[in-house]
Image: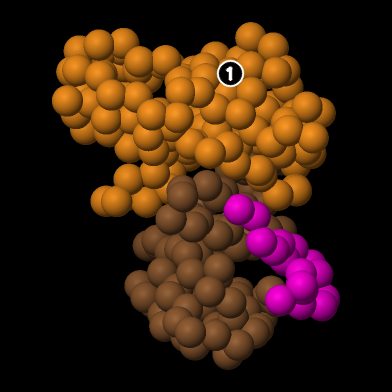
């Protein structure tokens, strides 16, 4: 079974609108971390936001927020006021607590976001 | 502060040749990761180091792949001999401490003909 599932291969949004990118995860660990990365067409991987499994509040970083629903095992990324520069591939990733500390990330397949004017 | 540095950015080689990818992590980071990205398999971990010691190499596809980290500021990923199916983008990432975000380098796009 996939550890990280991103069901939306592509999303389209207009400038200034908000968009939600879905991510569900599968783990039996109590301690884990969830990450979102952005990969523009240039190819680099840019860290956006992090949510720890014990964090009581949803993480926010500027226009990015993470809608963390632990019971549903979902960690959706919300981008408010979309900009043309937000067009990119977005990856959800998880670090599981059962590995040695400092674990690698398990990535989803990604969602391509296209922002139009 | 400079980010993660990878070289070369692009590599084209012929099947059977040895390929060496290089990475300089961010200073002060004690974890270093090598990932591979392909269209078919997405982003996958190959190997990671903690304080220069390999911790998990279960993602290394086969014996043709090897990785070293001789010191805190340098790591290499070597493929010998290379095969066309090794064509991918190889990312190096580093992080400080066990739970923090990982910062990725720009990647090396490898094409094996």
* Colour orange, chain: B
Residue sitting at x 58%, y 18%: B75
What crowding class fits label 1: few (fewer than 14 Cα within 10 Å), some (14-19), or many (20 or more)?
A: many
Chain under numbered label 1: B
- Answer whether residue A35 is visible to the viewer in this image: yes
The location of residue A49, given as percent across then percent down, is: 69, 63
In the rendered view, would you say A79 is above or below B4? below
- Answer whether residue A73 is visible to the viewer in this image: no
Q: Which quadrant, please, contains the N terminus of chain A? A: bottom left
What SS does tag 1 mark? strand
In the rendered view, would you say B22 is above or below A2? above
Which residues are drawn in magenta? A46-63
Q: Which residue is mark 1?
A: B75
The location of residue B112, given as percent across then percent down, is: 23, 26
The location of residue A104, given as percent across then percent down, is: 58, 43
Residue B27 falls in which quadrant of the image? top right
Q: Horizontal placement of B17 versus B20: left or right? A: left
In the rendered view, would you say B86 is above or below B16? below
Residue sitting at x 29%, y 51%: B39
Q: Which is nearer the eye, A95 or B75? A: B75
Q: Which is nearer the eye, B45 or B79? A: B79
In the rendered view, would you say B89 is above or below A33? above
Q: Horizontal placement of A57 versus A27: left or right? A: right
Residue sitting at x 47%, y 78%: A115
* Colour brown, chain: A
């Amino acid at each position: 079974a996939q550890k990280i599932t991103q069901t939306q291969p592509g999303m389209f949004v207009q400038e200034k609108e908000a968009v939600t990118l879905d991510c569900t995860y599968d783990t039996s660990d109590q301690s884990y971390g969830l990450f979102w990365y952005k990969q523009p067409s240039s190819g680099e991987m840019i860290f956006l936001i992090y949510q720890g499994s014990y964090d009581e509040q949803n993480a926010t970083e500027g226009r990015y927020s993470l809608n963390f629903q632990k019971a549903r095992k979902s960690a959706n990324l919300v981008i408010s006021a979309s900009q043309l520069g937000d067009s990119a591939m977005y990856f959800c990733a998880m670090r599981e607590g059962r590995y040695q500390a400092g674990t690698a990330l398990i990535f989803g397949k990604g969602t391509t976001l296209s922002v139009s004017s | 502060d400079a980010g993660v540095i990878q070289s070369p950015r692009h590599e084209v080689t012929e099947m059977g040749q040895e390929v060496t990818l290089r990475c300089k992590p961010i200073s002060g980071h004690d974890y270093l990761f090598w990932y591979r990205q392909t269209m078919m398999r997405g982003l996958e971990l190959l190997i990671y180091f903690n304080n220069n010691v390999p911790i998990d190499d279960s993602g290394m596809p086969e014996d043709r792949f090897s990785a070293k980290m001789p010191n805190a500021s340098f790591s290499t990923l070597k493929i010998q001999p290379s095969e066309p199916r090794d064509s991918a983008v190889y990312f190096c990432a580093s992080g400080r401490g066990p739970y923090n975000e990982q910062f990725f380098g720009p990647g090396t796009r490898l094409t094996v003909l």
